[in-house]
Amino acid sequence: MVLSDAKDKNALALSNIRRIILEKDLDCMNDSSHRTAKYVRIPIPLKRESKQRKVSLKVSQLIAFHKNSIIREKQKLGVSDYGLLWISFFRGIIVAVVLERLLLH
C-alpha cells in the first residue's frame, strides 16, 4: 500500500512538472516579441542553372544506368544495401590480388 502511494505521488509530481513546462512553452509561443527578437531570416542563395547545364545528357544517362543496374543486381541477388557493399568489397580484394599477381610476379 505504501509503495503504490509513493508511485502515485511520483506520477502526480511528473505530470505537474510536464504541465508547467508545457504552459511555459505555450506562453513563449504566444509572445509576439519573442518571435521577432529571437529568429532572423537568413537568405539562401539560389542554385544557378549553369551548374545544371555543365552536366551533359550522356553523363546523366550514365548515372541513371548505374543506379538502375545497382537496383537490378540487388533484386537478382536478393541482398540488402549492406550485403551489396560487402560483395563489392570482396570483389575489390579479388581484383587487387589478381592485378598484384599479374604485375609483380
Image (spheres, grey):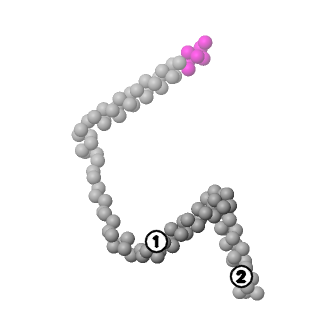
Q: Residues within 10 Å of mark 1 (few under 14, many from 20)?
A: few
**Left or right for 71, reference 12:** right
If you read the primary sequence from the N terminus, does the residue marked by circle 1 or circle 2 appear first?
1
Relative image position of residue 69 (x, y in whole percent): 58, 67
Q: Residue at x 39, y 75 (%)?
A: 54
Relative image position of residue 89 (x, y in whole percent): 66, 67
Stretch in magenta: 1-7
Relative image position of residue 17 (x, y in whole percent): 43, 27
Q: Is residue 58 visible?
A: yes
Q: Residue at x 46, y 24 (%)?
A: 15
To which residue does mark 2 refer? 100
**Left or right for 31, reference 10:** left
Which amino acid lies under the numbered mark 2 shown in the image of this protein?
Glu
Q: Which mark is residue 60?
A: 1
Q: Given this view, does label 1 or label 2 mark the residue nearer the observer?
A: 1
**Left or right for 22, reference 77:** left
Q: Residue at x 42, y 76 (%)?
A: 56
- Helix, strand or loop at label 2? It is helix
Toward the viewer: 77 or 11? 77
Q: Spatial distance from mark 1 to mark 2, Cα to Cα?
A: 34 Å
Which amino acid lies under the numbered mark 1 shown in the image of this protein?
Ser
- Quadrant location of the N terminus in the rendered image: top right
- Residue 31 on the magenta segment: no
Indicate the quadrant where residue 37 lies: top left
- Residue 4 on the magenta segment: yes
- Quadrant location of the C terminus in the rendered image: bottom right
Relative image position of residue 31 (x, y in whole percent): 26, 36
Indicate the quadrant where residue 95 lies: bottom right
Indicate the quadrant where residue 85 lies: bottom right
- Helix, strand or loop at label 1? It is helix
